[in-house]
Image: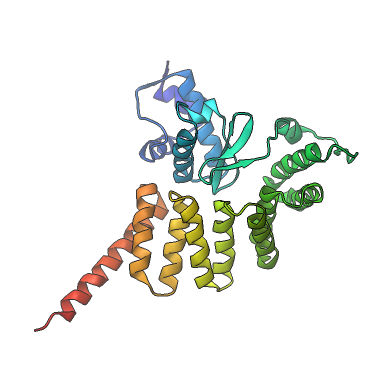
Amino acid sequence: MYSRADLLRILHLTPRQLANWERAGLIAACPAYSFSDLLKIKKVRDLCAMKVRPAVIRESLEAMQKQASGMGNPLIDAGASSTNKHRVVFRHDGRLLEPIAGQFLMDFSSREKVVTSTPIPSSEPGTHDNDAAVWFARGIALEEDPSTQTEALAAYQKVLEFDPRHAAAHINLGTLHYNRQDFTLAEKHYRAALQSDPRYALAYFDLGNVLDETGRVQEAIQTYKMAIQLAPTYADAHYNLALAFEKIREPRKALKHWQAYIKLDTTGPWSVHARNQIQRILQADTLKLVHSRPR
């Protein structure tokens, strides 16, 4: 068994980090930890280092446990990785699963090999499926480093040469273009992802972000609603939908989604903002009721 001090020293954590994850419900506070606990907390640390928010990790874990009943600890039993701050994917039954959207991705069993050292894939006939997987995994590795994101774009484009309907490649291309503020290309790829998989909740969410960013707020609202319809516990979609309703001055409609968000994310700065918005809306409604009463 390891003490709390041992845990902090071995995993290079601060007491504040550990306390934040405990408050977020990711790990249980206890005086001693097993080796299994260390592995789980290390995985949480690695995901947070990839900018994945604790609320997203917790939501993904809960969704994964529903998808695979009987799985005690998905972080260890199924493994976990991330391609961006909005999602965590797990290995399940030999395939990659994004549990919030219920989306199976292609199985990249050679991903670790690709990340470290990958030869240029062969384009001989009959190897296209394997090549698409190799190029996609290479794109994931390359986009983690800002200095190699141009190469990541090229890798994902190569995936689409082999498989033009590769939804995950379209999503990741869209996100790279979105981060460069090339919203036209981002929208093109998000819409292509939805053509390939109309039940891809993440694609609706990302498309909503583009529509909102380019001033098409009403369209963004409908798109965020589709993401929530497919994945009711999609916390970020509730948050962005509430913001969109605020933009068009519909605070009562925003209220419902602020309230949904704080149930899914109970701690952190976004949760604080949502609670402040709820309080502001309720106070404004109270004032309206007071002023509307007959004297």
Q: For this view, does 87 lie left or right of residue 4?
A: right
Q: Quadrant of the C terminus?
A: bottom left
Report the front residue among 17 and 175: 175
Residue closest to the far left? 295
Residue lying at the far right of the rendered structure? 124
Task: Give how far across and how far down residue 196 sits, in percent.
Answer: 67, 53
Report the residue at 19% width, 75% height from top: 289
* Residue 134 on image: x %, y %: 77, 38
Q: Is residue 11 visible?
A: no
The x and y percentages for residue 175 are 64, 55
Figure quadrant of residue 46: top right
Q: How many marks?
A: 0
Instruction: Spot the residue most to the bottom.
Output: 295
Residue 20 against residue 168 in the figure, above or below: above
Task: Where is residue 260? Give x, y as percent.
Answer: 36, 54
Considering the image in quadrants, where does the N terminus appear? top left
